[in-house]
Image: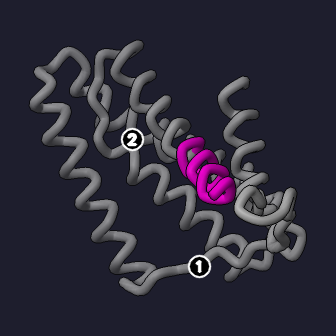
């Protein structure tokens, strides 16, 4: 039972970081960017390509994925998004949803339509068990890492 709560916390932290990005763009910039998930997808695919096709280590791929995604965002902001500042929210929504459809189609074309798994390093594959019986808390090392990373991003 506690394991389910812990897993929910890890998943909730991921959703929190994504929602925080949406809140910042809407709250500070008054811009509705529904392509936010496409940027998260781009970061994930950068990580997969660097790890599996180029052999980079996991801890080097993480900041590289953030950096490449930030550069992609800066490029799109300076060329496309900037033209939509001050426009009606419906224009922003339609544009960003269209951009999401294009991003998904591009990834499907380049990477294929089958699911791609991230090969986690050995140190993220273990599990820690605390307690016993119904109150056993099983914590996956990967989920602990996600919680720590999301906390660090939130505090930064």
Q: Secondary structure at mark 2?
A: helix
Expressed as whole percent of the image width and height from the top left, the position of residue 121 reads 83, 73
Would you name the residue on which mark 1 appears?
117
Q: Quadrant of residue 48?
A: bottom right
Note whether 80 is above or below 6 in the view shown. above
At x 65%, y 46%, the residue is 67
Q: Is residue 26 visible?
A: yes
Q: Quadrant of the N terminus?
A: bottom right
Secondary structure type for disc 1: loop
| 19 lies left or right of 136 | left
* Residue at image location 75% in from the left, 73% down from the top: 120
- Provide residue 25's location: percent of width, then percent of height: 39, 24
Which image quarter holds the C terminus? Answer: top right
Q: Is residue 93 left or right of residue 16?
A: left
Left or right, 21 with reference to 54: left
Q: Is residue 71 visible?
A: no
Region rendered in magenta: 1-13
Pick the front one: 131 or 120: 131
Q: Residue at x 69, y 70 (%)?
A: 50
| Residue 147 point in image, percent of width and height | 71, 45
Q: Nearer the viewer, mark 2 or mark 1?
A: 1
Q: Which residue is mark 2?
A: 76
Q: Residue at x 12, y 32 (%)?
A: 91
Whether 7 is drawn above or below 154: the answer is below
Q: Residues within 10 Å of mark 1 (few under 14, many from 20)?
A: few
Tell whether label 1 touches label 2 (CB within 8 Å): no
Q: Is residue 47 above or below residue 145?
A: below
Q: Is residue 10 magenta?
A: yes
In space, the residues marked 2 and 1 are separated at their CA atoms by 27 Å
Q: Residues within 10 Å of mark 2 (few under 14, many from 20)?
A: few
The overriding secondary structure of the stretch rendered in magenta is helix
Most foreground residue, 33 or 120: 120
């Amino acid at each position: 039972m506690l394991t389910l709560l812990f897993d929910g916390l890890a998943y909730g932290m991921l959703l929190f970081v994504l929602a925080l990005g949406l809140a910042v763009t809407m709250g500070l910039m008054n811009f509705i960017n529904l392509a936010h998930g496409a940027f998260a997808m781009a970061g994930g695919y950068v990580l997969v390509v660097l790890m599996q096709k180029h052999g980079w280590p996991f801890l080097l791929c993480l900041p590289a994925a953030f950096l490449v995604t930030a550069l992609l965002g800066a490029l799109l902001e300076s060329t496309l998004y900037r033209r939509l500042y001050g426009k009606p929210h419906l224009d922003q929504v339609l544009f960003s949803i269209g951009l999401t459809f294009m991003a998904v189609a591009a990834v499907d074309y380049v990477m294929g339509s089958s699911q791609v798994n991230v090969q986690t390093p050995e140190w993220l594959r273990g599990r820690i068990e605390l307690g016993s019986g119904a109150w056993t808390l099983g914590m996956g090392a990967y989920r602990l890492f996600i919680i720590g990373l999301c906390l660090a991003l939130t505090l930064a």
